[in-house]
Amino acid sequence: MVVVEVVFWVAVGLLLYTHLAYPLVLAGLARLTRRPPAPRATELPSVSLIVAAHDEEDVIEAKVRDALALDYPRELLEVIVASDGSVDRTAELAREAGADRVLELSRVGKIQAQNAAVERAGGEVLAFSDANARWLPAALDELVAPFADPRVGYVCGQARFLDQGGSNQEGVYWRYELALRELESRVAGVTAGNGAIYAVRRLAYLPLGPASSHDLSFPFMLSKRGWRAVYAPAAIAEEKMVATIEGEFARKRRMMRGLYDEVVGDGMLSPRGYGLAYGFEIASHRLLRYASPLLHLVALLANVALVGESAVYVATLALQLALLAAAALAGVIPLRPFRLARYYVLTTASIAAGLWDRARLGTPGAWDKAEGTR
């Protein structure tokens, strides 16, 4: 039983570390990190703002007008809409709203649509956004400001999710995630971004395969190549949150289908190219987090085997079963603690579900809109 005990406590320890201890360690490192003040740009760079869109006629016109209304010199801003096999009026409405360039592509998937737009873009900085995201007027100016530092290759802004009053608890997690992102940016660089608002230096852009995503792959891939990936919290975009926990599970499951290709294929798992601090962030925040479904399963099975050994293991098993029971009861007893338990269980399970979909269905290409976010 000694081996089983070791396995149990290692699994539990890693779970507690990645979710609770890592933020504390990161905060300590951030306090010790002293970086010189960021340089100020003497002149603004030209920017190509790229929106990949599939059947977005309900929101694309507002998105283009929102982009053109940003507090950024119009002569330095190019708005490109890459219509990814749209069968509605997405392309037509984007043109009418004033987009500088509209690409009408066959259904190739989001990443390939973005790659096609980049080939035609003229900006020194490539900014990206989703069709349903609305940027605050100063967002683009704040987003490009870090590029005054020649070491910066990638910048992500702050995505704010607008609560629609449903059961989803993503807002709680997202505030936690943004706090980690700000600390990581101060230490070695962010380990992930978001699709609502981010930018890449043109010289640093890498065409990715259809199963990858800019959100996850760009920060670590560019870091391996010597660029810094940073967070600009004053660059703010807003979009609607998925209303239900079950809808959030489905959204994350779709995202996680490409996880294997990003972790293994794009090289996240390989330590080659990482600095010590950034490698620490990747292992602590990404790899251990993605291993959470396995760690939970190992902890539960080992705990069942150990339950007769002492009262400690009775208590730990009771805690694990209580988490699962609370998640199950959230559907009939809509109390906040139960909803948080359900959110945690389902979002953790979404990692395993996405990997299962990848094994059954192969690499993802095209993407679907999350229900209720338009």
Image (cartoon, grey):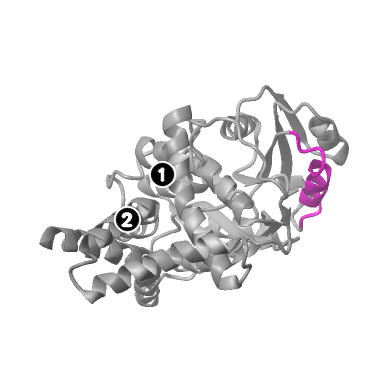
Q: Position of residue 12 (x, y in %)?
A: 29, 64
Q: Position of residue 215 (x, y in %)?
A: 52, 47
Three-letter amino acid code at the position of disc 1: Met
Q: Does residue 299 show up?
A: yes
- Look at the image and give the residue range highlighted in magenta: 55-70
Residue at figure coordinates x 48%, y 64% from the top left? 325
Three-letter amino acid code at the position of disc 2: Leu
Residue at figure coordinates x 83%, y 43% from the top left? 61
The CA distance from mark 2 to mark 1 is: 26 Å
Task: Answer whether residue 230 is magenta in the image.
Answer: no
Q: Is residue 189 left or right of residue 49?
A: left
Q: Is residue 193 above or below residue 37?
A: above
Quadrant of the image containing the N terminus: bottom left
Tell me the SS state at disc 1. Answer: helix
Q: Label 2: which residue?
A: 295
Q: Is residue 4 above or below residue 118?
A: below
Question: Going by the picture, which residue comes out furthest to the left?
Answer: 2
Q: Label 1: which residue?
A: 221
Q: Nearer the viewer, mark 2 or mark 1?
A: 2
Residue at figure coordinates x 65%, y 25% from the top left? 107
Task: Answer whether residue 57 is magenta in the image.
Answer: yes
Q: Does residue 39 show up?
A: no
